Image (cartoon, coloured by chain):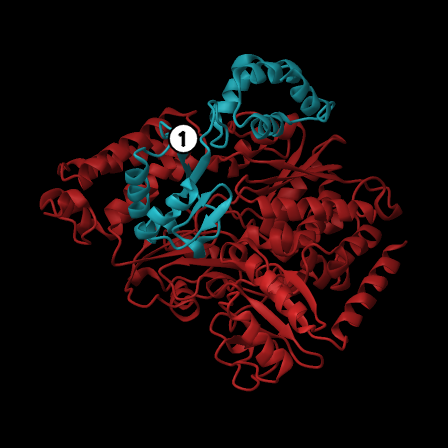
Chain colours: A cyan, B red
Amino acid sequence: MREQLDEIFTRYQEQKGVTIQILKEIQEEFGYLPEEALEEAARFLGLSKNDIFGVATFYEYFRLAPQAKHRVKLCLGTVCYVMGCDAVREELEGQLGIKIGERTADGEFCLERLPCFGTCEAAPMIEIDGESFKNLTPEQIREILAQRRS
Amino acid sequence: MTFEEMRTRAKAAWEARQKQEIPTIIVGMGSCGIVAGAKKVLAAIHQELQRRQIAATVTQVGCIGLCYAEVLVDIAKPGRPRISYGRVTPEIVPQLIEDYIIKDNPRPDLALGVMAESGIDGVPAYKDLAFFKSQLRATLANCGLIDPESIDDYLANDGYSAFARSLKTMSPAEVIDTAKRSGLRGCGGAAFPAGLKWEFCQRSPGEEKYLLANADEGNPGTFKDRLIMEGDPHRLVEGMLIAAYAVGAPYGYIYVRDEYPLARKRLELAIEQAESYGLLGDNILDSGFSFHLGIKEGAGSYVCGEEMALIASVEGRRGMPRPRPPFPAQAGAWQKPTNVNNVETLANVPAILSRGWEWYSGIGTEKSNGTRIICFSGRVKRSGAIEVPFGLTLRELIFDIAGIAEGSTFKAVQVGGPSADLLPIDKLDVPLDFDAMTQAGTSMGSGGLVVIDEKTCMVDLARFLLHFNRDESCGKCVPCRMGTQRMVDLLEAIIQGQGKPEDIVRLEQLSETMRVGSLCGHGQVAFNPVLSTIRHFREEYETHIRDKRCPAGVCKALIS
C-alpha cells in the first residue's frame, strides 16, 4: 500500500486544496478508503485524522468499506421522482433485498443514491458500473440485474 | 504564432470543411445523447460508411438542446443546408444513409429540421420549430454546431477574439464597466449583478486572487451548465479569461461536480489546448497578464453549489458555508480575494465584450437584460434546453415551447431547484423577469422548469423534496439540520395517514425557524416546497390529514 500511496502523493506535492483529489485517487486504487490509507493521506497533507475523516464522511462519493462488485446508482432527483423513480427504487430494493446505502450479503450489489445525473430526459435513470439505463420501469429492473449477475 | 495567425488558420480550415465535396455527418455527443445511445449510433455510421465505401467526414458536436429527440444525427451534403434527424438508432442508420446520402430522399418522416431560411422538401426550417421559434442563441451559439474538442473550431467561430481585443484595447476597469452596463446578472440563482461583483474583487488589495467558476449545478432539472461545458467548453474558458483580467486574478478553478465526468473531460482538454496555444498561462499574448486555470472536482454534495461551501470544497475541506461578511471578494479561497460566478454567467461574457453592452442590454426586459438558458423536464412533450430573451411568460414557455406530454394534464411547475416554488396553472402568467417574479412572490432560481402532472401527489412530492434537502444539509446549523428532519417526519406521518390537524401550523412554524436561523441559502429556503404546496394545494394536505385520503392515488397507506 505504501508504494501505491507514494505514487499518488508525489503528484500532488506543492499543490493546494488537493484533499478531495487525493481521496478520489485512493478510492480509485483500492476500491474504497482504507483506514490506513486515510492516515497516510492525513500525514502527507498535514491534517489531523479527524480532519481527513471529516472530509471522507462528508461527501457522498467516498466509501469507507469495500464496495460491492456492482454499484447500482439510482437517481433521486425531482424529475426522476416525477417520472416514477419511487417505483423503480421499490423494485430494486425488493429484488436485491437491501435498502439504499446498503450492500448485499454476497457482495454482488450495492445500492446508492445519486441526486441528479443532469440528463433529465432519461428519467428515471440508473447507472450500473458506468452503464446508463434510461426511462426505466420496474419491469425492466429484473432483466437488468439478471444481466449483471451473469 | 500570433493570435491573428491562429485565428486565420482556424478560419481557413473551417471554411475548407464547409466547402468540401463530400458529405459531413454530425453526431450529437453530449451526455444526453450518449445516454440515449449516441456511441452505438456513431459506430453504426462508421460501419455503414465503410461497408458502402462512402467518403464522408464524421464529426461530433455537443447538445443543441433537443434532448427529447436524442440521438441526433445531422447530415450536410455538399452545397445543401444541414438537416437534423432525431431519434436515430443503429438500426435506422443504414437506410438513412442510403436514402439521403446515396439517393436524394431527405426523409421528412425522420427529419426534425433544416438549418436554412425556410423549409425544404417537407422538412421544416429550424427557426419554425416550436422549440426554436423564440430562441436567441448567444451563449449557446456554438452548441450543437462545433466540435467541443477542437480549439480551432472555436477560434474559427470568433472564439477568443473578445478576450484578445479586451486584453489589448481595454483596461480592467473598462471591462468591468462594460459588464455593469450590460446588466448581466448571475445565472446560478442569486442573480447578483456580475459587473458589480467583479468590481468588489478588483478593488480588494493584493496580487493573489482567485476566480472560481461554479460548475456544481446540483439542481435537479437544471443542466444548462452541463450543456455549455460539454458543447462549448472554450466559451467558459474565454469568459473566465475576461473575468480574471477584470478582477486581477492570476489563478482560477472550475469547480465541476463529480456527476459530470464528460464535462470535466472536455474542460481538461480545452484547458490543455488553450495552454498549448498560449491563451492560458504566463504572459498571455505578450500582455503581461497571466492566468492559470485548473479544475477542482466535487465529490457528491449539493450544498457545494453555495459559494461559501464551494470555496471550502475548493480548499479541500468539508463543504460547509461560513458567515458573510467577510464576502469572498475580500476573503475567499485561502482567505484571498475571490470571485465566484456561475458557468452560464461567465459563458455570457465573450458575446457581451464582442458585441457590446448596448446589444446585451437591449435584449430582454428593462431590468432583466439579455438571455437565459431555460431547461425543460418532467411531463413535457419536448424536454431539453433553450436560450431565450427575458420576458416570455412561464405559460408560453411551458405550453407553447415545451408542450405538455401526451396523457398528462398540467398540475404544477417547479422553477429553478428543489427548494423552488411549486406553481399551479393560474400562476403561470408571470414573465421571465427578476422583478416581476419577485413581485409575484416567486423566483427564477437556476431556470430549470420541472413540469408535474395529475399523477403526482403534492404532499408526497413535498416529502420527497424535503428528504432531498435534508440529505443534502451540511449539518452545521441546527435549524436546517433538525428542521428538515422534523419536516420530513411530519410529512411521512401525513402520507401514512397519521397526520394531525395542527401539523400544517407546525410545518409553517418550522419553516420560519429555518428561514431566520439558517446560515446559508440552503437552510434559508429548504422548507419552501412545503410552504409553497400548502399555499397552492392546501386541500390536498387537508384531505390527507382529515379524510386520510390521497386525491392523486399515490400514497399507498391511504389507498384502501
Name which residue lies at 52% across and 63% down: B71
Dot 1 amino acid type: Ser
At which x and y percent is residue B224? Answer: 53, 54
Name which residue lies at 71% across and 49% down: B270
Numbered disc 1: what chain?
Answer: B
Lateral position of residue B12 relative to residue B132, left or right: right
Between residue B47 and residue B189, name the one nearer to us. B47
At which x and y percent is residue B516? Answer: 37, 32
Between residue B85 and residue B41, name the one nearer to us. B41
How busy is the neighbourhood of tag 1: few (under 14 within 10 Å), some, or many (20 plus)?
A: many
Q: Is residue A84 above or below residue B334?
A: below
Name which residue lies at 71% across and 81% down: B79
Name which residue lies at 55% across and 29% down: B325
Quadrant of residue B476 within the rendered picture: top left
Quadrant of residue A6 within the rendered picture: top right
At which x and y percent is residue B84? Answer: 57, 72
At which x and y percent is residue B103? Answer: 62, 84
Between residue B466 and residue A87, name the one nearer to us. A87
Q: How many marks?
A: 1
Q: Is residue B435 above or below residue B300?
A: below
* Residue on which the image places disc 1: B518
